[in-house]
Image (cartoon, rainbow, N blue to C red):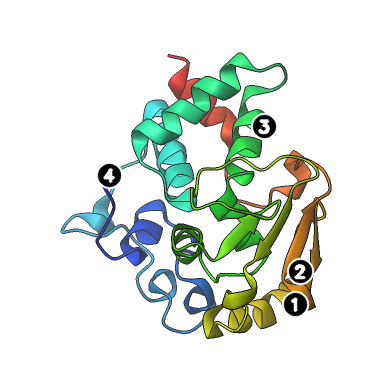
Amino acid sequence: MARYRDSVCRLCRREGEKLFLKGSRCLGDKCAIDKRNYAPGQHGQSRSKLSEYGTQLREKQKGKRIYGLMERQFRNYFRIADKKKGITGETLLQLLERRLDNVVYRLGFAPTRKLSRQLVRHNHVVVNNRKVNIPSYIVKKGDIIEVREKSRNLKVIKDSLKETEKKGIPAWLQLDSPFMKCVVMNLPTREEINIPLQEHLIVELYSK
């Protein structure tokens, strides 16, 4: 499967805001946005004003980059959301938030979604007492997600959990930190999804 292998800091600069793709580095003095808050490339400082289509496209690109998805994956989630009842944009975000790699990130088991995807792939996470190594697995209400007992001493997980204690976790997840176990209490609402995304622009783009 295709993957983005270039510097993720370029992605934040292209969108003109912090997407928090490098964890704690984004909060420090080395953040690329703080140093060079303009788009990368030769003409990055002379970008013209975006058209309506350009604004919608940038919002879609931002969503893809936040969740670390390729175009086909992202479009498939939109198609699923579009078929469901309710507000399509909110349903889209809810599906993305319920991805296992995102839940692992939200719980603080990993400092970034990219690293949380690796933890899932390498069988460090179990769901309902079963190994699940598919990052795109969609969690449901009542699911129990936990770090495997043999993996609980991994330094990256312990360090990440310490940082998460300061920030907290979403209300729809209930975490038992000592046992690195979580119960999905509810499905996330739009108010509980704290990402800088205007989902209605994505819906408008894909609906053309």
Q: Which residue is mark 4?
A: 1
- Viewer-nearest of discs 1 and 4: 4
Which amino acid type is marked by label 3? Glu
Tags 1 and 2 in contact by the CB under 8 Å rule?
yes
Q: Is residue 83 left or right of residue 45?
A: right
What label does residue 199 carry, if any?
A: none
Tags 1 and 3 in contact by the CB under 8 Å rule?
no
Q: Nearer the viewer, residue 141 or 47?
A: 141
Q: Is residue 136 above or below residue 203?
A: below
Tags 3 and 4 in contact by the CB under 8 Å rule?
no
Q: Nearer the viewer, residue 183 or 71?
A: 183
Residue found 42% across the figure and 56% down from its top = 16
Q: Can residue 196 be seen from the camera position used here?
A: no
Tags 1 and 4 in contact by the CB under 8 Å rule?
no
Helix, strand or loop at mark 3: helix
Helix, strand or loop at mark 2: loop
Image quarter hosting the C terminus:
top left
Helix, strand or loop at mark 4: loop
Measure how far apart labels 3 and 2 are at the Cα level: 22 Å
The first of marks 1 and 4 along the sequence is: 4
Answer with the quarter of the image where residue 107 lies. Answer: bottom right
Measure how far apart labels 1 and 2 are at the Cα level: 5 Å
Q: Which residue is mark 1?
A: 165
Q: Which residue is mark 3?
A: 90
Q: Which residue is mark 2?
A: 168
Residue found 69% across the figure and 74% down from its top = 164
Which amino acid type is marked by label 2? Gly
Q: Is residue 167 left or right of residue 20?
A: right
Helix, strand or loop at mark 1: helix
